[in-house]
Structures are given as C-alpha cells and as structure tokens.
C-alpha cells in the first residue's frame, strides 16, 4: 500500500509534540473539506513513535493515522527550564533534574492532539478519531483518556467544546480500541521498577534507558519515584473499564506476549474477564484477547534462525490489528 507521511508539530504548554501523519494513497479524488477517519497510535514507557510495530502499522492501515512522541520523549523534547523539576535529595544525594511525565502530562498531550485534530488540514481535510492503538503505559493512559471522553460525551464526542464549530463533524467517534500489553494491576509497577533498578525507592528514582532525547536517541534519564507512584495509584482502571465496557458498539482487542516479563500474563486475563461480555444485542463493547506464544513485552522472542539476534513477532501484531479493524 502506498502512503504519504507528513511531519507535524503539535503545541502543548511551552513545547511541541513531534508527530507523523500517515495517509494512505487513493486513486479517488478527495473533496475539499472531506471528513476522514483517523487512528491514533500511542507508544509506551521508554519508547517513541517509530519503535516496535508502530511505524509499519501506520503504513499498512487503510485509514489515516497519527503517531506521536509523548512530552519529553523522542522528538517532543523540552528545553524550557520552567517545565523541569529539581530534587536535590534524589540520586543518592547528588540531586536530579527531570521532567515529571505523570498522568496529567499525558492527558495534556492527548488534549493537545484533540485540539490539533479540530483544525482542518492545509488541503481542507478534517479528521474524526475512530481508532485508538496503544502499547504498555501508552495503552493504560489511552484507555484512561478514552473513558474520560466517553463519560463526558457518550457515546460520541461532539466538537462543540470550543475546539471547532458547532456544525462540524464529531472530533471523536470511537469504534475500536486496541490494547497492546497494558498493565491491569497498576500497583505492581513499583516493585517492577525496584527489581529492574535496585535502590529505586531509596534513591527516590532511578536512571532508566529511555528515548526521552531529541531525535529519538536512547540514553539514561532520571525517572522520579513520584512519577511511577502517580501511574500506580492515580489511574482508576476499573472505573475506566466499566465506562468503556458500557459503550454500545465499541470493539476492543488486547494483544499480549506469552513470555512478557514486564506485565504479568494475569493482567491479560483480567482485561478478558472484565471486558468479556458477549452481547448479541450489541448494547455493550465486545472484547477479543490474543496471546502470542514466545513473544515478550515488545513482541520479540529467542532467535530461531542461525545468525539472528531475536525473533520478531511484530508482524503478527500488525496482522492481528489489521484483521481486527475489519471486524
């Protein structure tokens, strides 16, 4: 499938979010002011808009998509010192300066994207957000944000909130939510960080290998314990699930790796348990769970061919998502 990609910069607070708008090529002419469906592709902790399956998925979707870097990640770097926090007692008393990427920061990023979507593109095209596809932490916050939208404007989010004119099409009309390896037991993220970064609690944070660098360069970045506590205790996942579950016609897909060592497989089955309510009348959301054997949290596995470093199961993730979006 041929496609066109456009780099976009979305203003939020005192910086911008780096994103890529991917539109499939079509032989059909586009009317000025046409309204098209759009998928939002969301990365996880330590990732960026082009890692694992995200870029290739965007290029194979039959609808337009926007993939972006959360604030302080990838190309959404922050240079304004007013957005940083200093903790002189952190890092074994050496101090640490960091951007606090908590729940509210991610929600601000989502709000900025919605405001950007409300404006027509240079060719007059307008987009309605119909599909959310998130990985890991990005999936957790994606569902949290979606639930907030659905509670405010069920089941369709109108465009009358100062973002666009009253007679415009809805900014959001959710049809599909794809959860790739999100946590369910959010409180377990704290012992997970302590296990991976010994002294994380005592030092009030730790240096994680992260892509919160300009131009997508990996490096060590200080992650404060307060950021992880915010995710562990301030995302009401059960309330969010209940809101999403009660949305008529919404279709949900969860994809997990059987060998995930970051998010326990119990979390996959918990989503299946709380979401799975087959309803012939289509009065509630419908959920499908897919588990990929031998795949880890990022959908890689041990090598099977001589000379390869690892097996890549991301093509299976992409195929699963594309098939689901035809459901």
Image: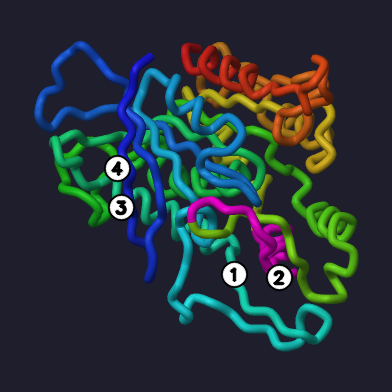
Q: Residues within 10 Å of mark 4 (few under 14, many from 20)?
A: many
What is the number of callouts on the image?
4
Report the residue marked by disc 2: 224
CA separation, marks 4 and 2? 37 Å
| Residue at 46 percent of width and 54 percent of height | 75
Q: Position of residue 194 (x, y in %)?
A: 87, 61
- Of marks 2 and 3, the one in the foreground: 2
Report the residue marked by disc 1: 100
CA separation, marks 4 and 3? 13 Å
Report the residue marked by disc 4: 158
Residue at disc 4, secondary structure: loop
Residue 240 position by quadrant: top right
Which of the two discs, 2 and 1, labels the residue nearer the N terminus? 1
Residue at disc 2, secondary structure: strand
Q: Is residue 307 above or below residue 259?
A: above
Report the residue marked by disc 3: 115
Q: Is 283 placed left or right of 210 in the picture?
A: left
Which of the two discs, 4 and 3, labels the residue nearer the N terminus? 3
- Of marks 1 and 3, the one in the foreground: 1
Q: Residues within 10 Å of mark 3 (few under 14, many from 20)?
A: some
Q: Which residues are magenta?
A: 215-234
Q: Position of residue 156 (x, y in %)?
A: 36, 36
| Residue at 36 percent of width and 31 percent of height | 22
Q: Position of residue 58 (x, y in %)?
A: 45, 28
CA separation, marks 4 and 1? 31 Å
Mark 4 touching mark 2, by CB under 8 A? no
Which of the two discs, 1 and 3, labels the residue nearer the N terminus? 1
Considering depth in this image, is 216 or 22 the residue closer to the camera? 216
């Amino acid at each position: 499938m041929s496609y066109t990609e456009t780099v976009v910069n979305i203003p939020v607070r005192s910086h911008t979010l780096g994103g890529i708008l991917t539109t499939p090529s079509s032989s059909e002419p586009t009317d000025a002011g046409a309204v098209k469906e759009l998928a939002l592709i969301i990365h996880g902790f330590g990732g960026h808009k082009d890692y694992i399956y995200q870029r290739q998925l965007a290029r194979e979707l039959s609808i337009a998509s926007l993939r972006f870097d959360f604030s302080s990640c990838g190309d959404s770097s922050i240079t304004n010192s007013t957005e940083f926090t200093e903790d002189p007692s952190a890092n074994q008393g050496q101090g640490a300066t960091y951007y606090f990427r908590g729940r509210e920061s991610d929600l601000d990023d989502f709000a900025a994207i919605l405001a950007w979507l409300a404006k027509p593109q240079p060719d007059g095209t307008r987009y309605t957000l119909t599909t959310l596809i998130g990985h890991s932490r990005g999936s957790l916050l994606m569902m949290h944000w979606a639930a907030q939208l659905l509670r405010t404007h069920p089941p369709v989010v109108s465009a009358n909130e100062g973002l666009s004119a009253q007679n415009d099409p809805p900014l959001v009309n959710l049809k599909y939510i794809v959860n790739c390896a999100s946590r369910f037991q959010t409180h377990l993220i704290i012992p997970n960080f302590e296990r991976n970064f010994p002294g994380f609690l005592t030092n009030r944070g730790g240096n994680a290998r992260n892509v919160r660098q300009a131009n997508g360069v990996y490096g060590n970045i200080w992650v404060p314990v307060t950021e992880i506590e915010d995710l562990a205790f301030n995302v009401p996942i059960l309330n969010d699930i209940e809101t999403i579950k009660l949305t008529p016609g919404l279709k949900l897909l969860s994809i997990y790796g059987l060998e995930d060592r970051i998010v326990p497989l119990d979390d996959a089955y918990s989503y299946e348990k709380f979401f799975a309510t087959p309803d012939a009348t289509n009065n509630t959301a419908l959920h499908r769970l897919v588990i990929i054997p031998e795949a880890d949290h990022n959908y890689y596995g041990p090598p099977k061919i001589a000379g390869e470093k690892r097996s890549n199961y991301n093509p299976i993730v992409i195929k699963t998502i594309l098939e689901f979006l035809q459901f």
